[in-house]
Image (cartoon, grey):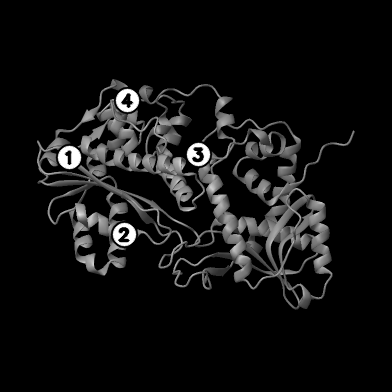
Amino acid sequence: MTRYQPHLSKTRIQNGRQCHKRLWLDVHQRALAEWGEASQLRLAQGTAFGELAQALLGGGHLVEADHTQSREAQAETQRLLARPRARAPQIFEAAFEHERVRVRVDVLRREPRSDTLIEVKSTTGAKAEHIWDAAIQTWVLRGAGRPVKRVQIGHLNKDFVYQREGDYEGLLALTDITDQVDALQPGIPTLVRQLKKVVQGPKPEITTGAHCSSPYDCPFIGHCQSMEPPQPEFPVTLLPHGGKSVEALLAEGYRDLREVPEDRFDNPRHQRIAEATRTGKAFVDPALRKAIKALPWPRYFLDFEAISFPVPRWLGTRPFQQIAFQFSCHVQTSARAKPRHHGHLDTEDSHPEARVAKRLVECIGDTGPILVWNRGFEAQILRQMADVQPKLRKRLLGMVDRLVDLLPLYREHYYHPDQRGSWSLKAVLPTVVPGLAYDGLEVANGLDAQMSYIALLNESLGRPDEERLRAALTHYCATDTVALLALS
């Protein structure tokens, strides 16, 4: 009986480099994969940039056969390569195979005496995993007889500003990685042989860990965790920025944070977390309440919702620029005064920050602290707004100086066991005010907000669904500032 010999691909080899079990599952039990909305959004954005990159590179011939039609794609590629170079100088999605490894090349540029391979990525630079992607493809192409001499990463130019409708000239940047790719070539045959043995053997026994999210989130983590013994309620891995400390504890056999001796912690924050977890009692430093009480009135509680696009959608914006499309602001004039709420959700499909800024200055006065959670984000948004609203620049930059960040105050002076190592607003809020939480909201996190906003922009909804989604977005953003009120 012939032994089953599945083909490898660039993606499968990269999966195997991350985790042998991930590779095995991708080959034998692919239906177990669960792709989150964030992964699907990144994939869609990457595909859109890839298609745009083809035009920016001057166009060419596209191999039409899809990724399930490997033989057809290879045959189509060979027909294009049989043409004189002048008639097919650039081929997109060219398909090649070498030693049962199949690849599709984003761009194959035929030079007079050699080839240039271009791997397109919707990032602002070449990353280590991108170099590996290109190296695997280069090995296959050279093995298949193509004279690949130069290798490049085509990526987003972070300095590009979208200035004319439909004109993306300058968005694509090319970075030469030939030397890095060539340096990896000697090790690829051994890697390929090793991974072929993995897919032909039994399922590897590998437990979940940090490798499950580096360099990419694994879609099989849910399956793998379901097959493992239940984790303790408070595993040692919940320690934030645990690094080598957590590795050492695991190596010594500790799994439950409550069982780790007190003298094993050098980090003061880890000590506080461990003590609160062990006793079941929250750590509350009186300095927290004292610092908040000292803040003057009126007080403003502010939160922005923002979105970024790899390929700029609106004039005046850059790749991955965080752009505020919504804000919520609660205003409280004294300790006994009832808070007033203001907010704005902008769904006009053009750069929204000027309109958001105009509404913002209508509710925030010239004096009083502006309380936020994670100051850096709000400060960035306010500075950007100042750039697009010169008449409001002084007021907006003045708001930056008035920002008061509750996050570091709580990080240094408060911890509840139910936070499980996190100081996100969503983790802290229910431990302080049990009746307040984000559970059950239609829009319950930042990704939900972005996906909902895109749906509103694309006008893909009927009137009832549009109104429901607008209400859900408004409620979610307002919940953030209600939380800030409750925590102050």
Q: Residues within 10 Å of mark 1 (few under 14, many from 20)?
A: some
- Which quarter of the rendered picture does the N terminus lie within? top right
Q: Looking at the picture, how far across and down is residue 457, in whole percent?
A: 46, 53
For discs 4 and 1, the disc positioned in front in the rendered view: 1
Q: Residues within 10 Å of mark 4 (few under 14, many from 20)?
A: many
Dot 3 or dot 1, earlier in sequence: 3
Kindly identify which residue carries mark 3: 210
Kindly identify which residue carries mark 2: 355
Q: In the rendered image, which quarter is residue 39 located in?
A: top right
Q: Amino acid at mark 3?
A: Ala
Q: Is residue 120 visible?
A: no
Q: Residues within 10 Å of mark 2 (few under 14, many from 20)?
A: some
Is 173 in front, or is 328?
328
Dot 2 or dot 3, earlier in sequence: 3
Contact between labelled residues 2 and 1, with CB atoms less than 8 Å apart: no
Q: Secondary structure at mark 4?
A: helix
Is 305 in front, or is 133?
305
Dot 2 or dot 4, earlier in sequence: 4
For residue 439, side relative to residue 123 (left or right): left
Q: Tell me how far mark 1 sits from mark 2, CA to CA.
A: 24 Å
